[in-house]
Amino acid sequence: MNLKNDQFLNISDSITNPYITEWQSDGKKVLGHYCTYIPDELLHAANLLPYRIRATGNTSTNLADIYMVRFTCSFVRATFDMALKGIFDFLDGLLVCNSCDHSRRMFELFDLKVFGIENYPKPTSRFYYSIPHVITNEGFQWFYNEIKELKTEFEEKYLKKTITNQDLLESINIYNTNRELLRKIHELRILDTPKIT
């Protein structure tokens, strides 16, 4: 798919975009997530499109405020409000981790008030995994086990197919290449006279 420059620059102005539509038209699934601690490589290896849930264009939390106290993070309230309005109905599922108590509560509410309602447009799957909040040997082992369990859950309950080590290695290489390219872009932006802004 080729997009003109103005389309590329404005792609973040909208909740959906042509890439998501094309992805789903090929029968592939889109998994929404809130946090940067998402195992993108695992989702890519599973042929799932990770979709970062955003509050783009939302100006109110009136519906979400019914279910969440006012001191709940405004980002979580705004995105949950959008979900209640059906704006994220294109998602095939949701993946959330314990990055904060607010997103954890949002996960429960998504399950009860969005995906759990009778008129939700399609079957969905919900996935929750834990991340360590300090890096220790025990924390690393715990995280490793969580990712293994998530992989098994994808394979057995969601995809009904095996995610091979080769699939994972290819995805890790793709994401590492992408990270290196982003580092190079960052280097161009931090110069006294930035080459790109």
Image (spheres, rainbow, N blue to C red):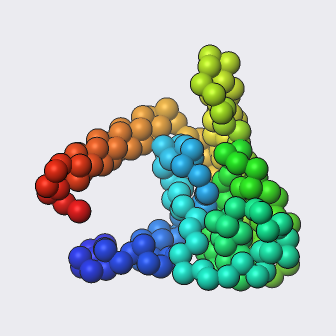
Quadrant for the N terminus in the image: bottom left
The quadrant in which the C terminus is found is bottom left
Q: Residue 70 occupies which quadrant of the picture?
A: bottom right
Q: Position of residue 143 (x, y in %)?
A: 64, 30
Query: Is any atom of residue 92 visible in this view?
Result: no
Residue drawn 28% across and 76% down?
A: 3
Q: Is residue 5 above or below residue 182?
A: below
Direction from residue 27 to residue 17 in the image, left or right: left
Name which residue lies at 34% across and 44% down: 179
Closer to the camera in the image, 2 or 47: 2
Q: Which residue is situated farthest in the front direction here?
A: 192
Total numbered badges shown on the rendered structure: 0
- Residue 126: horizontal and vertical position, in percent? 73, 56
Which residue is at 57% across, 46% downward? Answer: 38
Above or below 104: residue 20: below
Please name the residue shown 31% across and 74% down the image. 9
Q: Position of residue 193 (x, y in %)?
A: 13, 55
Vertical comparison of 103 with 13: above or below: above
Where residue 186 appears, as percent x and y from the top left, is 27, 49
Q: Nearer the viewer, residue 123 or 33?
A: 33
Front residue of 155 and 128: 128
Give the image quarter of residue 58. bottom right
Q: Is residue 36 visible?
A: yes
